[in-house]
Image: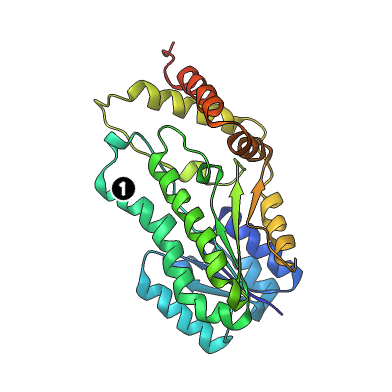
Amino acid sequence: MRTVLITGATSGFGKLMAHAFLNHGDRVIATGRNLKERKDLFIQERALFGERFLELNMDVTNLSQVKEAQEEILKQFGHIDILINNAGYGLFGALEDLKDVEIRYQMEVNFFGTVNVTKTFLPLIMKARGKVFNFSSVFGFMGFPLTSLYCASKFAVEGLTESLRGELAPHGVQLCLIEPGGYRTNFGNSLNWSTQDDSSFKTQFQNYKNLHQKIASRKPQDPSEVSYGILKLSLKRKLPMRKVYGKDATFSHYFRNFTPSCIYFSVMDFVFKKIFMRESN
């Protein structure tokens, strides 16, 4: 039986992955902020899977909580076969409008949270010669206006993961970047859209929000494609460096990586102008 640790397991991809791995027969450790106090979140899982399902409080930005969770898992299981760094937070808005506390929190959750968890649990992962999945995004390989800090946090996760892949390979640990596009999760509803009343970017900001809402109203992609896709990946002998999920992300990935830079940025400049600078009716 494999032991799987999932951060940000209270909703979205995290909760779906918990289901996928439990149904496969694995032991799942679901973590999240104040998780033990939110008894309604995992009623079904507790009833169906018993001792194969463990809930732990773990805010990835709180290093003492991360270390407490590591000590508990070490005492109970002694190792981790799979770590999934899924916890994330989205901050959208023009850089000029973002508050310092918002900027730092974006990096604390998405980047330093991944660092905190990975570093703390490495001894348990190395003991099992395990696998680590780090959640990035389509915005982890391409920049987009009004998402500069979110993109920066995911670009940082990409650099961290690529570097650790080679660093940990001699110890039998494999890493994989997960790069999803837009899916039907609660991520869009939990975004922090930050702006100022007198912002110089008011037109761009409103146009982007309108676009985001328009895309969200269309038939979205099924997030189980990602959760069960990661389960299938975890069963492979060798992990790929990255796995892109979603038609939108797949198109963006090929366009970004196989188009000459001069053409890519010319096209994107045209697209950005059409999206962000049109006047509202």
Whether residue 97 can be seen here: yes
| x 27%, y 31%: residue | 196
From what the image shows, is residue 74 above or below residue 8?
below
Q: Nearer the viewer, residue 70 or 235?
A: 235
Which percent across, then down, holds residue 113?
A: 42, 62
Three-letter amino acid code of the residue under disc 1: Glu
| x 59%, y 78%: residue | 171
From what the image shows, is residue 160 above or below residue 98?
below
Which percent across, then down, holds residue 18?
A: 64, 64
From what the image shows, is residue 28 above or below residue 146?
below
- In the image, taking residue 181 as reference, residue 38 lies left or right, namely left
Which percent across, then down, holds residue 93?
A: 37, 35
For the residue carrying disc 1, how many other residues have a C-alpha within 10 Å: few (<14), some (14-19), or many (20+)? some
| Image quadrant in which you'd find residue 133 | bottom right
Which percent across, then down, holds residue 176?
A: 61, 60
Secondary structure of the residue carrying tag 1 is: helix
Q: How many circles with numbers are drawn on the protein?
A: 1
- Residue at mark 1: 102
| Image quadrant in which you'd find residue 250 | top right
From what the image shows, is residue 146 above or below residue 149?
above
- Placement of the C terminus among the 4 image quadrants: top left
Whether residue 37 can be seen here: no
- Colour treatment of the image: rainbow
In this view, the residue farthest toward the top is 281
| x 47%, y 37%: residue | 143
- Placement of the N terminus among the 4 image quadrants: bottom right
In this view, the residue farthest toward the bottom is 75
| x 66%, y 46%: residue | 245
Q: Nearer the viewer, residue 77 or 268?
A: 268
